[in-house]
Image (cartoon, rainbow, N blue to C red):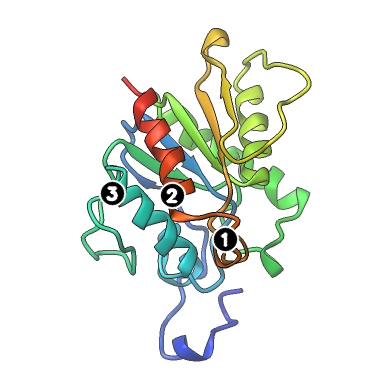
Amino acid sequence: MAGEKRASYQNETYWGRPVPGFGSLDARVVVVGLAPGAHGANRTGRIFTGDRSGDFLFASLYRTGFASQATSTRIGDGLSLENAYITSPVKCAPPDNRPTAKEKATCRTWLMAEWQALDQAEVVVCLGGIAFSETWHLLKDTGLVLPSPRPKFGHGVEVDLTGVGGPRVLGCYHPSQQNTFTGRLTPDMMDAVFNRAMGMIS
């Protein structure tokens, strides 16, 4: 993917490597996406940075008190997160933005390492069905006894796992252009999820 440059970025050097999470390790809220965007994080080296999905997400995080600014254009642009950490279950940009089962399984080790470092996390916001499913895998792999069957993903879905020693899990549609351009996900809808997350933390 690193070699497939968009015409407007021909003069830029793409990051083209696994993209780490971003934010504070003492965060109370963990945001789980899908994978680096081919011309966003795969280009800039920072998750949800440099594409329209990131523009939509960080604008919401800014409005709801988690981000220092509403834009995320490049590493070193002054952006910082307060009480939030953003990661993804797949660390490299997958072809056609469709990660395979093998990619997801391979990257779970890295997601687990991040989760273990985030020992203050109380809420997980899952951006899309894959994030919801992979978060469930992650929490199960930590040894938590989770409800069965797994709750169905949906926008605004809430799963309280505090009774088994886990976090609260919130569902949110992914801020992909397919969702935001069609109105399936609006700014108010995303703000409502993050405001809910803010209200859940201690």
Q: Amino acid at mark 2?
A: Asp
Q: Earlier in the sequence, mark 1 or mark 2?
A: 1
**Residue under pointer 1:** 183
Residue 56's place in the image compared with 136, above or below, is below
Image quadrant occupied by the C terminus: top left
What is the spatial separation of the Cα atoms under label 1 and label 2, in whole angstroms? 11 Å
151 with respect to 52 (left or right): right
Residue 106 against residue 37 in the figure, above or below? above
Q: Depth check: give the residue in front, 58 or 43.
A: 58
Q: Is residue 97 left or right of residue 15?
A: right
User: Please, what is the three-letter code of the amino acid marked with disc 3?
Assistant: Ala
Q: Pointers 2 and 3 in contact (CB under 8 A)?
A: no
Dot 2, crowdedness within 10 Å: few (<14), some or many (≥20)? few
Q: Nearer the viewer, residue 6 or 11?
A: 6
Q: Secondary structure at mark 2?
A: helix
Find residue 188 and name its label.
2
Residue bearing the label numbered 3: 67
The disc labelled 1 sits on which kind of residue? Gly
